[in-house]
Amino acid sequence: MKIALHNERPEEAQLRRLMDDLAVEAGDQPLLQESEAGRGGRVIAAYDSGRLIGIGRLVDSSAGAEAGGFECTLLPSYTGREIESSMRKLLSARRICR
């Protein structure tokens, strides 16, 4: 199984399905902030066979977090596969290259 990472904001329908999937897997409704799925260029989405399984972003220091901070929402069934670390590396590399 290959996980595809895309450097773009997912469609609203995909985000809603991710929220539903998170609620089923986690047993509650997690908070996926609009800022995490924001329209900025520092968002990365993870897909498994076209299904959105996670989304991550770099946090600006102006948002009250450390510079280069990272937030990620990932379906629990996909944890432990180094998806989060791959997302973080790609977003950090993109920031350095700008």
Image: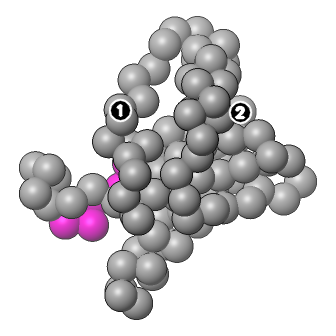
Q: Can you name the residue that lies furthest to the top here? A: 27
Q: Is residue 67 above or below residue 38?
A: below
Rendered image quadrant of residue 23: top right
What residue is rendered at 89% in x and 54% in y?
A: 1
Q: Is residue 73 above or below residue 44?
A: above
The residue positioned 74% from the left and 60% from the top of the image is: 4
Residue drawn at 52 percent across, 9 percent down: 28
Secondary structure category for the residue under label 2? helix
Where residue 81 sits in the image (x, y, percent)?
69, 52
Is residue 68 highlighted in magenta? yes
Q: Nearer the viewer, mark 1 or mark 2?
A: 1
The quarter holding residue 58 reads bottom left
Render colour scheme: one colour
Magenta segment includes 21: no
**The magenta stretch spans which residues?**
67-71
Q: CA separation, marks 1 and 2? A: 21 Å
Residue at the disc numbered 1: 33
**Where does label 2 land, which residue?**
77
The three-letter code of the residue at mark 2 reads Ser
52 vs 25, nearest the viewer: 52
SS majority, magenta: strand
Which sits in the foreground, 47 or 79? 47
* Image quarter of the C terminus: bottom left
